[in-house]
Image (cartoon, rainbow, N blue to C red):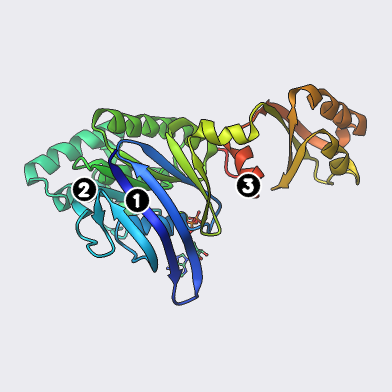
Amino acid sequence: MHLAIEAVGLGKTYKKNNVRANVEINLQVQQGEIFGLLGPNGAGKTTFVKQVVGLLKPSTGKLKVMGEDVITNPDAVRNQLNYMSQNIFAVWHLKVREVIENSGRLRGLSAGEAKKQTQNLLEELGIEQHGEKAIFHLSGGLRQLAGFGAAFIGKPRLLVLDEPTSSLDVARRRKLWDKVRELNQKENVTVLLVTHSVVEAEHLLDRLAIIQDGKLRAQGSPGELKQKVDNRLRLEIIPHNGGLPSGFTRDLGQFGEVFEANNRIVVLTSRGTLQNAVGLVEQYGFDYIDDFRIGTTSLEDVYLKLGGGILGTA
Ligand SMILES: Nc1ncnc2c1ncn2[C@@H]1O[C@H](COP(=O)(O)OP(=O)(O)OP(=O)(O)O)[C@@H](O)[C@H]1O
Ligand SMILES: [Mg+2]
């Protein structure tokens, strides 16, 4: 089995503030998979990604990308990967068309080929009418689509996307997911994708790693990770502004594991006891809550169980 990314004991400490942003990370991404990194703000996801693409030098450990040692030879894989960074553009004054074309040229396409592929991508991404606009004139979402254009051109073997769809509306987000899947399946492009979105993770990823405080907390397929909370149901309660009466959360604890974050309460309960939990909510009365929902467990619950906060669900 060929590995696209192999990190062994990878660590990164930023010297200027002594922050240990990655700690002893052991992670393998197989060629041909869509692999995700999920974790809260400041967890160390971008730091990891920047080491993979050769923009940051690891402090400790080993890191191979497409079989090459990027610590001793950071240039070796540059022409095999495309990277869409979290802050996409330094080139504000350039036009969308120019940015995509330049990316293609940097990746070794001929002028003619870069032009042709740029035109195709502008059409495919639905931004042809914005091709002649400068990047700084675009909305956040269109800017992100232009970023995709620059990331997709030139047929990379490894695509590294750092929160690529955070500014896109739902329809465009789904379109982009389809495109990433298509590149993965038809062109065998390996994808490393950072996301905060549980929906994106469940939709797109073959496997993922959950990172917190610079450390890898869990990895596996969405299905494998969900087995940690399997066969349970979730009851989610949104308290009214005034909060909940004392004792409410404690009482809920009889029926399962209770997590509180971002003004929401999540109870993971077995199928048999769900009714009792709902009964308790009724008993306290609905004046205290704005909403409550019952659903099946998601990756977010795995994440809650690992001690993290509530992630974005967009
Ligand atoms: N250039 C830098 N110099 C010093 N510290 C940094 C630098 N970049 C990141 N950090 C710190 O390293 C830690 C990890 O940051 P990183 O950007 O990797 O997190 P992240 O998981 O990508 O977060 P987000 O979800 O907000 O993008 C944070 O504590 C951050 O403040
Ligand atoms: Mg980041």
Instruction: Determine whether the residue tagged by mark 1 lies in a helix, strand or loop.
Output: strand
User: Residue 39, how many percent across, how many down?
Assistant: 53, 49
The amino acid type of the residue labelled 3 equals Leu
Rendered image: mark on residue 306 = 3
The amino acid type of the residue labelled 1 equals Glu
**First in residue order: circle 2 vs circle 3:** 2
Query: Which of the pair 285/260 is nearer the observer?
Result: 260
User: Residue 13, how many percent across, how many down?
Assistant: 45, 69
Q: Is residue 78 left or right of residue 140?
A: left
* The residue positioned farthest toward the bottom in the image shown: 16
Distance Cα–Cα, label 2 vs label 1: 16 Å
The amino acid type of the residue labelled 2 equals Gln
Marks counted in the figure total 3
Instruction: Please say if 295 is above or below 218.
Output: above
Q: Which residue is mark 1?
A: 6
**Label 3 CB sits under 8 Å from any ligand 1 atom:** no
User: Residue 198, how many percent across, how many down?
Assistant: 54, 38
Q: Are marks 2 and 3 in contact (CB under 8 Å)?
A: no
Query: Which of the pair 133/70 is nearer the observer?
Result: 70
Residue at x 7%, y 45% (from the top left corner): 110
Quarter of the picture containing the C terminus is: top right
Rendered image: mark on residue 80 = 2
